[in-house]
Image (cartoon, rainbow, N blue to C red):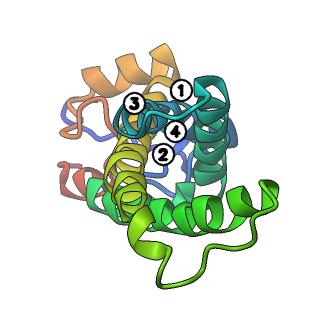
Amino acid sequence: MKNQAIPVAEDQALAPGGRGGSLRDRLLSGLLAGVAGGVLFGLLAAPANWAVHLAASALLGLLFGWAMGNSVRSAGAGFVWGEAFGLLWWLVGPLTLLPLLRREGLIWSTDDAPVLVPQLLGAMAAFGVVLGYGYYWLARWLGSRGQGAEAGEQRAGAGDPSGPWPAPAAHAIAPR
């Protein structure tokens, strides 16, 4: 079994570099990355109620992991999907839901938009980037741990060039 690659079963593969991770891993990665992005965005925006802000960030992270998890297969894809998700929730949150909850009406005018541009930058740059990158690396880490100690020991002993991370390209290159 010297220098022989051990194939990873598709049901154990991880979204970044595989065919999709378990729902539990995707949700946990989204939750943790969402809270991290929410903390950074909260430090920049100083929300009135931190508990509500962090709860919303956690829910958005869960939604990201559930909806976008299979699309985030690289750090670059995490960046792009995180930015898009931040933009979407800036449109849905401060421009739509919050004004409706306050019974103020929608803030969809060009007069009101410049006031909310700092929130847009925060939602995309702080929340979106941290959510996307954080999700990618957490999902990757959780997926490598989820394969079990036994599989990890076999992989490490087999001379697999991908190391502890599942990488289909490395399996194609490995000597047989």
SS for tag 3?
A: helix
Residue 131: x and y in percent read 43, 45
Mark 3 or 2, nearer chain start? 2
Which disc is residue 141 wearing? Answer: 3
Amino acid on which the number 4 mark rests in the picture: Gly
Residue 144: x and y in percent read 42, 30
Nearer-the-camera pick, 133 or 110: 110
In this rendering, position of residue 174 left or right of residue 123: left
Q: Which residue is mark 4?
A: 34
Q: Residue at x 44, y 30 (%)?
A: 39
Query: Which image quadrant: the N terminus?
Result: top left
Mark 4 crowdedness (10 Å alpha carbons): few <14, some 14-19, many ≥20: many
In this rendering, position of residue 53 left or right of residue 37: right
User: Disc 4 vs disc 2: which is toward the camera?
Assistant: 4
Q: Residue at x 37, y 65 (%)?
A: 117
Mark 3 or 1, nearer chain start? 3
SS for tag 4?
A: helix
> Can you name the residue that lies furthest to the bottom here?
110
User: Image quadrant of residue 52?
Assistant: top right
Q: Which residue is mark 2?
A: 14
Mark 4 or 2, nearer chain start? 2
Q: Residue at x 53, y 26 (%)?
A: 146
Which disc is residue 146 wearing? Answer: 1
Marks 3 and 4 close (CB-CB < 8 Å): no
How far apart marks 4 and 2 lie (CA) works out to 19 Å
